[in-house]
Image (cartoon, rainbow, N blue to C red):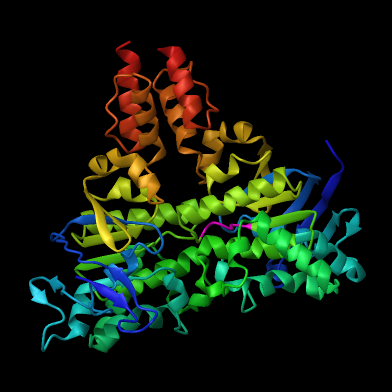
Amino acid sequence: MSYIYNAGQPMAHEALRNVSLTIEDGEFVGLIGHTGSGKSTLVQHFNGLLRPTAGTVFVDGVDIFGKDVNLRKVRQKVGMVFQYPEYQLFGETVFEDVAFGPKNMGVPDAELPGRVDQALALVGLDPGLKERSPFELSGGQKRKVAIAGVLAMQPQILILDEPTAGLDPKGRDEVLSLVAYLHQKENKTIVLVSHSMEDVARLAQRLIVMARGKIVLEGPPEVVFRQADYLEAIGLGVPQVTKLLQALKKQGFAVDPDHYTIEAVEDEIVRLLETK
Amino acid sequence: MADALIRFVDVSFSYSSDLEHGFEALAGINLEIADGEFVAVLGHNGSGKSTLAKHINALLVPTSGKVFVAGIDTQDGERLWEIRQKVGMVFQNPDNQLVATTVEEDVAFGPENLGIPTPEIHRRVDEALKIVGMSDYRLHSPHQLSGGQKQRVAIAGMIAMRPRCIVFDEPTAMLDPVGRHEVMQTVIKLNQEEKITIVLITHAMEEAILADRVIVMEEGKIVLTGTPREVFSQVETLAKLRLDVPEITSLANRLRRRGFAQIPNNILTIEEMVNVLCRLG
């Protein structure tokens, strides 16, 4: 798949170049790359918000840009949580905002309260907030309302573009736990777009790294993080604890540097200290 | 320590919507920030840290108590512009702070409003863009810039006012790692080379460790203060406040719990950890 912004015009810009990629049902993929690498452009193709200049996208075997495909159905299957989704809240009440998506999909009015309750419960918001204006809520709560609005459509695939940006550590942990829950307990396929290595490393089964509109690295986190120098050169990095193991290895310590969570690194250093 | 540039004396503040339930966003703050100091303020959302910041340049004034900036009472309405010239603010969202059609006009906006003569404005704009490393972009439109570049232009706009202090309210929260690095390098340079007092509100621990002093807020009060090393060694208190500690500090504490008490609890960087492990080995 390729995508050119302003194709045929002087300002034309090739944002995606021949990207080929498969995501399995139930997989958790972390998509990383710095600003301008093409990661947001890529995910906007997954539910047909952007139409590729060349190539296409299949969702569940269906070419979503094919003839007679109802993009509304695709968008029900592929839920998209944009960056700063709280900026898109508009309803007079939280209920209205969360019910908007399913209502538009044609869910009967009688079913809407159930959908809303279920979505609010998933994101951990008090059902008592339903009648409040979303604009009275805190930033973290607003973000959860926006995510609930996507979950209320019961998508099978969930794309989240920088869902923790601008949140404080508490808000960030809550959103990441929610994403982990949706993957593990609700069996959703997740694509998490982020430039935080720590966030994606902890959750994703596979990382896809983009730079200049191409996929430049792909694989399980420990494999991708072996390329620490390359990642830094393209404006990314590796988790601090992985960097530590790599530094220790350079100093001649017998450590396995392929760990990226604090728990695993702790075990690795304990092993090192105990075998002395 | 040099004289205090900023002084909070028993400052409490309630937003008007909270007055009736008696909720205080700031509750009895006493704080002095020295001229030339670099202070980081941590605390989760709602802890009062942005409210504190807005008191430094009189965007808010205390409900009770006093704030002094270079000896001026921020409630002295006649000297408001003097205070705003001394204390600049840079906010989180790079898109909301730029007003003009070119970078140089944007940087000139503040000094023009101060009524500074044109040749002097040119000098200041040149100097400010040079400090933030954006001289090559002076004729660009701000909307063509990356997030980190936009923040640097916003900072240049502040520098051109020749402030004594700049308050940064989560300036990197919306930026990618490259943008964060650019902005933090600029912040350090302003402090070290231009001797500008810095107040940095942040959630990022790797930024807070660069400060001379860290202040932690909770429920409108200052609950911890000290050097980054002193503050981050309080791992349990910080966890209770649901704040992060730098990942390496957290690892050091986990290793201590596993029985390696020789590892200090206040390690901040990878290099320090490598050195400690080399000594143990």
Determine if the magenta segment contains residue B172: yes
Please tell me which residue is depicted at 33% across the width and 44% down the height of the picture: A230
Quadrant occupied by the C terminus of chain B? top left
Hey, which quadrant is residue B224 in on the image?
top right
User: Who is closer to the viewer here, B220 or A160?
Assistant: A160
B18 displayed left or right of B249: right
Where residue B191 appears, x then y in whole percent? 71, 46
Q: Is residue A71 left or right of residue B86?
A: left
In this rendered view, identify the residue nearer to me: A175 or B84: B84
**Up/down of A102 relative to A225, above or below:** below
Say which quadrant the N terminus of chain B sits in: top right
List x then y, in percent, for residue B34.
80, 43
Q: Quadrant of residue B225?
A: top right
Residue toward you, A246 or B52: A246
From which residue to which does the magenta span run?
B169-173
Q: Is A101 on the left-hand or right-hand side of B274?
A: left
Q: Position of residue B116 (x, y in %)?
A: 85, 71
> Majority secondary structure of the magenta segment?
loop
Q: Is residue B37 visible?
A: yes
Q: Residue at x 38, y 41 (%)?
A: A239
Task: State whether residue A118 appears in this view.
Answer: no
- The relative height of residue B262 versus residue B86 in the rendered view (above or below) is above
State yes or no: residue A260 in magenta.
Answer: no
Residue B216 lies in quadrant: top right
Q: In this picture, is A70 found above or below A125?
A: below
